[in-house]
Image (cartoon, rainbow, N blue to C red):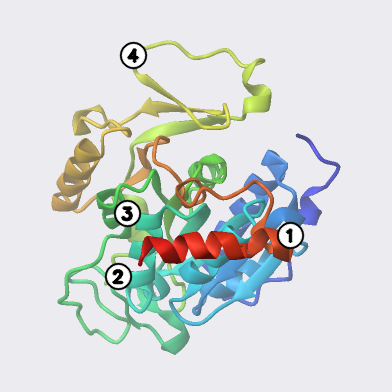
Amino acid sequence: MPIELTMDDYKGAESTLCAGCGHNSITTQIIKASFELGIQPHLVAKISGIGCSSRAPAFFLNKAHGFNGAHGRMPPVATGAALANSHLRIIGISGDGDTASIGMNHFIHTLRRNTDMVYIIEDNGVYSLTKGQFSATADIGSTLHNGDVNEWMPIDCCGLAIEMNCGCVGRSFSGDAKQLCALLKIAFRHKGVSVIVVISPCVTFNNHDGSTKSYKRVKNVIRPLHDINFIDAACLADTAKIAGDKICEIDLNDGSMIQLKNLEYDYNYDPTDRHKVLSAMNRARGENLILTGLLHYNKNRQSLREQCHLVDKPLATLSADRARPSKKALEEIIAMFA
């Protein structure tokens, strides 16, 4: 439903990140997507951990709730917030270090539980706050600005999310504003956890010729799978569906629609078939290419809220007599274990 707010109402403090940082571009698209969807800022909770990426929530939706947690612990805080108040829209901001290293266990369990949240990973391949050491997503053969070469296998957060049957997985590039904005809109409308990984070059420590996550290199190796068109449910009645066998249409839980116009037909790509998606990603990896777009979508998984059979009223607002089991109920529970 349209609300009387301007784009400025979705902004935050002025960014303190390096000029040209890809994270700032991601922030811009979060603001744009939130504004165009008419999301009410006071019904949003922004959760982050530690790292350059985790400073980003300060730069958007200044009227939203926010919590900056410990390194790698964004997911459990977000899960708690989602369970305490299911009316809140949870946006979790993390980085490749915050998620793929110290926070990996929490990331996996968030996928397993299917927490209702948008999980954004801003991936630059290095630990920028501590002068640019390799992170767990750095590619084999990538070099640091001092010449050190990475010899370790990278962790692919998108591939891991798909293996864990995450219902909404996308990958984008901070330099592709149109694609990223569309992916964020899809993520905001998805039920359960949505994982959006954004390759976001670090202009200070990882933007040289030896880096596989520099602006120059990423622009040369990304291969968008499709053009994405997100149609909000409120606009669907006035929008004609595009016909043709090269258009894939996916209905979202709230009635909105995704339209995907295939670009790379030879990848035998189907976003609803996670086995084909993983096959396409493995093929692209072997060709030193990076597939971007909506990688996988499945709206049929039960969310954490549904699995826990939560009442509609937020748990944080329940009175004690509703939240606390009665003496009779406790006796019945105890009797079950007698």
Label 3 amino acid?
Answer: Ala
Label 2 amino acid?
Answer: Ser
Q: Which residue is mark 2?
A: 211
Q: Quick check: marks 4 and 3 in contact, CB under 8 Å?
A: no
Closest to the observer, 290 or 161: 161
Closest to the observer, 318 or 265: 318
Q: Is residue 144 above or below residue 198?
A: below
Q: Which residue is mark 4?
A: 245
The picture quadrant where one finds residue 336 is bottom left
Horizontal side, residue 256 vs residue 336: left or right: right
Q: Which mark is residue 11?
A: 1
Quick one: label 1 or label 3, which is nearer the N terminus?
Answer: 1
Callout 3: SS: helix
Which is in the foreground here, disc 4 or disc 2?
4
Q: Is residue 46 above or below residue 245?
A: below
Quick one: label 4 or label 2, which is nearer the N terminus?
Answer: 2
Which is in the foreground here, disc 1 or disc 2?
1
